[in-house]
Every structure is written in C-alpha cells, then in structure tokens.
Amino acid sequence: MHDLHVWTLKSGIYSLSCHIRSDDPMLSLKRATRMLNTKYKILHTTIQIEDSNDIDIDFDCKPHH
C-alpha cells in the first residue's frame, strides 16, 4: 500500500484513499474494503488497485517537479 490519505468528513465520519499493489486485485479490494469498514469504521473509501503482474505500467506515485 502507498499514497495513503485519511481525513475527517465530519465528527466520527472518515474517508480514505490509497493505492494497493496486488497479485489478486479483486480479492485485495474486497478484503481491504471489509477490513476498513469493520475494524476502523471507515465507510467512504477510494482504493486504486494496481496489478503487480502488470510490468508495462508504473503506477508508483512520485512527485512531479
């Protein structure tokens, strides 16, 4: 996981965005969403899944100068 951002929408309501690199993108998305909902009560999520098998695309977030 990288490029993780968490912020408060209002008191007790949180939002999260992140990138996850995975060998099984759909399973990772399901597990991450479930864990964020149940363990951390984060219901508003944006998760970008990056297929670690896709070597043609570099999704790493690097600062642009």
Image (tube, rainbow, N blue to C red):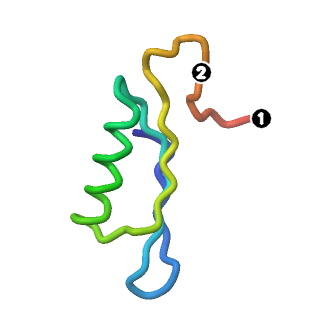
**Is 58 located above or below residue 16 in the figure?**
above
**Closer to the N terminus: mark 2 or mark 1?**
2
Q: Which of the image's four quarters has the N terminus? A: top left
Tag 2 residue: 58
Using the image as rendered, state which of residue 5 and residue 57 is in the foreground.
57
Image location (x, y in percent) of residue 51 = 46, 25
Q: Residue at x 60, y 11 (%)?
A: 56
Instruction: Tell me whether circle 2 and circle 1 mark residues in contact (CB < 8 Å).
Output: no
> In the image, which disc is placed on residue 9?
none
Residue farthest to the bottom, as pictured? 11
User: Where, by quadrant of the figure, is residue 42 drawn?
Assistant: bottom left
Q: Residue at x 56, y 29 (%)?
A: 60
Image location (x, y in percent) of residue 8 = 48, 76
Question: In the image, what residue type sits under mark 2?
Answer: Asp
Mark 1, other Cα within 10 Å: few <14 / some 14–19 / many ≥20: few
Left or right, 33 with reference to 6:
left
Tag 1 residue: 65
Left or right, 21 with reference to 28:
right
SS at mark 2?
loop
